[in-house]
């Protein structure tokens, strides 16, 4: 009987652990501006999204690292934005109330950036926009309600003027599973 209960407990625990993925923070675009020619000094929007559905997020801290040929023209925030400190390019913290939940889709819009490219795509191929750790703390993290405990976040990189498609490899399911071992 103990083995049966242990087997059931493990069978229920493992899927829960696999589903508890680390949240990611990255830049997404609407339309196709990120890989089609961008006219110099024409504004376009980039969206900072937190992908997660495990926390009631009250704050995030990060830094936006950009290609020097891209200019940050402005930042706007969602309706539940409460406070922001710093600058996205030198270290930024944003707080929210009520908290971001990821409901129903598993992601939340944290900020909208207005960007300008100094050059056209032929002159600045693969210009990166990277979400990195806040320079003061050295951490890329968030806090969640009710006690503002901290959790780690993985930063993503996006590209403006992408010259080639996204790299991928064909592999077997067994090779993918071996990465978790």
Image (cartoon, rainbow, N blue to C red):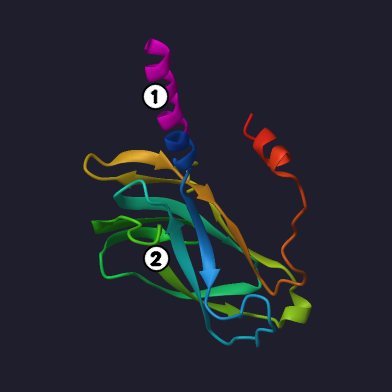
Q: Which mark is residue 9?
A: 1
Against 79, is 150 above or below? above
Who's the residue at 33% across and 45% down the image?
A: 143
Marks 1 and 2, the one that precedes in the sequence? 1
Who's the residue at 44% across and 24% down the image?
A: 10
| Residue 9 forms part of the magenta stretch | yes
Residue that protrudes farthest toward the front in the picture: 1
Please state which of residues 22 and 115 is positioned toward the viewer in this rendering.
22
Please state which of residues 10 and 59 is positioned toward the viewer in this rendering.
10
Q: Position of residue 173 (x, y in %)?
A: 69, 43
Who's the residue at 44% across and 40% down the image?
A: 20
Report helix, strand or loop for mark 1. Answer: helix
Magenta stretch: give its range: 1-14
Against 35, is 68 above or below? above
| For residue 80, side relative to residue 162 (left or right) | left
Report helix, strand or loop for mark 2. Answer: strand
Q: Position of residue 55 (x, y in %)?
A: 33, 47
Query: Around disc 2, counting alpha carbons within 10 Å, would you say few (fewer than 14), some (14 to 19), or many (20 or more)?
Result: some
Q: Which mark is residue 109?
A: 2
Q: Which callout, 1 or 2, points to the residue nearer the camera?
A: 1
Against 70, is 54 above or below? above
Q: Position of residue 140 (x, y in %)?
A: 47, 46
| Residue 24 forms part of the magenta stretch | no
The C terminus - image quarter? top right
């Amino acid at each position: 009987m103990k083995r049966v209960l242990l087997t059931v407990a493990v069978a229920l625990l493992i899927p829960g652990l696999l589903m508890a993925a680390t949240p990611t923070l990255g830049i997404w675009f609407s339309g196709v501006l990120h890989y089609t020619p961008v006219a110099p000094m024409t504004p376009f929007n980039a969206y900072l999204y937190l992908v997660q559905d495990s926390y009631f997020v009250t704050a995030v801290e990060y830094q936006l690292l950009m290609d020097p040929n891209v200019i940050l023209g402005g930042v706007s925030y969602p309706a539940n934005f409460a406070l922001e400190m710093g600058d996205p390019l030198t270290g930024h913290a944003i707080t929210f109330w009520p908290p971001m939940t990821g409901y129903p889709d598993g992601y939340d819009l944290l900020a909208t950036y207005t960007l300008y490219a100094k050059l056209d795509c032929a002159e600045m191929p693969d210009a990166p926009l990277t979400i990195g750790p806040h320079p003061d703390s050295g951490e890329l993290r968030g806090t969640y309600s009710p006690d503002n405990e901290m959790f780690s976040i993985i930063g993503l990189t996006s590209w403006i003027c992408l010259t080639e498609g996204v790299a991928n490899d064909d592999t077997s399911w067994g090779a993918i599973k071996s990465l978790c071992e």
